[in-house]
Image: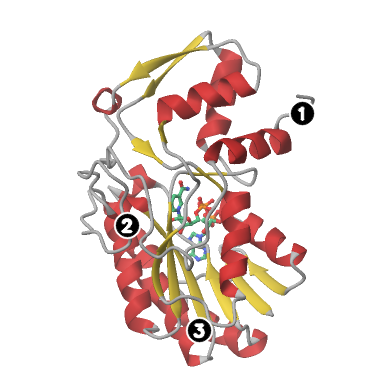
């Protein structure tokens, strides 16, 4: 199949391109410099020339705190840009796989969020991702899959485990919040699932939750990362309120699915962490 990957220079985009190439597909991965999803004309030219069967939209504004003071810019990419991709894909008969986020939820629940749960984003970023879901659904009602995932980490970009490894190498102790709980997701695992979804004869339509199995707090993830890398650094429990970050985060955003059989199941986040460390930490 011919697959177009937008945001191909990003953490997830790189792994999606690699997974699609490994699976033997005809892959056109374009970075922001090569295809800006806010540019409808550029999208139309790309689809006309490349004629992809499906597009996997990995392009996004992902600076969660920065979005609080740049809401127009975040919405332009995550809302309108996502709609542009889906509209152009629909016009060319291509399926859209769009990536969304657990941050569309407010975190008030204490059991896994499923696809039909009430959305109530707390932050500008979360609202922009919800706007993207709505724009994709409106632009290509019959030919889209929205994949909500969470807490991504991977070799292709800055991510939480990378930050922990750097801090643990520099300090004797780090403080990490234990009052946010979610599903860490290895981009290598998510990427393979996205490619498998995009290349199904008939991908499932609508929203799917796809995240690493299990759940933990950022504190738990920090401890596991530092211990698995064999670093001696104490991890202390912190509280989100003490960080004073501009964007509020959901305290609980564990994803589950009410569409078993349609939503791909990913390996446990610990397996993802192990693969991540194998790929990024030399001589373990
Ligand atoms: N990271 C997470 O924890 C997380 C959690 C849940 C969902 N997600 C979603 O997963 C997807 C992938 O995220 P990621 O972690 O891979 O983020 P990322 O590394 O920041 O990748 C996003 C990519 O999009 C590109 N981009 C930004 N604006 C663009 C535009 N107007 N046109 C085309 N490309 C543009 C960026 O280019 P530049 O590098 O040039 O800026 C970057 O390469 C996003 O939809 C994100 O919302 C992420």
Residue at point 47% right, 68% down? 262
CA distance for labels 2 and 1: 38 Å
* Left or right: 227 as drawn, with respect to 132: right
Count of number-bearing discs: 3
Label 3 Cα crowd, 10 Å radius (few <14 / some 14-19 / many 20+): many
* Left or right: 10 as drawn, with respect to 234: right
Which label sits in the foreground, 2 or 1? 2
> Looking at the image, is 216 positioned above or below residue 58?
above
Question: Can the viewer see residue 32?
Answer: no
The residue positioned farthest toward the front in the image shown: 261
Label 1 Cα crowd, 10 Å radius (few <14 / some 14-19 / many 20+): few
Q: Nearer the viewer, residue 244 or 13?
A: 13
Choose the circle earlier in sequence order: 2 or 1: 2
Q: Which mark is residue 282?
A: 1
* Callout 3: SS: helix
Kindly indicate the quadrant of the structure image that contains residue 42. bottom right
Tag 2 residue: 114
Q: Which mark is residue 89?
A: 3
Residue at point 38% right, 63% down? 78
* Callout 1: SS: loop
Which label sits in the foreground, 3 or 2? 2
Q: Nearer the viewer, residue 246 or 149?
A: 149
Residue 11, given in percent of the width and then of the height, sits at: 58, 50
Choose the circle earlier in sequence order: 3 or 2: 3
Residue at point 49% right, 77% down? 96
């Amino acid at each position: 199949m011919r697959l177009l990957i937008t945001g191909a220079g990003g953490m997830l985009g790189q792994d999606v391109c690699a997974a699609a190439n490994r699976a033997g597909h005809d892959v056109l991965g374009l970075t922001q410099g090569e295809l800006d999803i806010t540019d409808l004309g550029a999208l139309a030219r790309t689809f006309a020339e490349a004629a992809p069967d499906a597009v996997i939209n990995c392009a996004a504004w992902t600076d969660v705190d920065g979005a609080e003071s740049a809401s127009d810019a975040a919405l332009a990419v995550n809302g309108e840009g996502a709609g542009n991709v889906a509209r152009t894909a629909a016009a060319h008969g291509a399926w859209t796989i769009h990536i969304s986020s657990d941050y569309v939820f407010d975190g008030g629940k204490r059991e896994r969020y499923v696809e039909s749960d009430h959305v109530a984003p707390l932050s500008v970023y979360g609202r922009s991702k919800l706007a993207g879901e709505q724009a994709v659904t409106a632009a290509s009602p019959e030919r889209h899959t929205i994949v909500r995932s969470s807490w991504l980490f991977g070799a292709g970009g800055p991510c939480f485990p990378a930050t922990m490894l750097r801090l643990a190498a520099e300090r004797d102790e780090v403080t990490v919040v234990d009052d946010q709980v979610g599903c860490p997701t290895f981009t290598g695992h998510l990427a393979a699932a996205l490619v498998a979804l995009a290349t199904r004869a008939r991908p499932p339509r609508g929203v799917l939750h796809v995240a690493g199995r299990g759940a933990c707090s950022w504190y738990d993830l920090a401890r596991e990362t530092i211990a698995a890398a064999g670093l001696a650094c104490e991890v202390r429990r912190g509280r989100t309120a003490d960080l004073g970050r501009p964007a509020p985060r959901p305290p609980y955003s564990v994803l589950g699915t009410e569409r078993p059989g349609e939503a791909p199941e990913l390996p446990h986040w610990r397996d993802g962490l192990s693969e991540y460390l194998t790929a990024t930490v030399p001589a373990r």
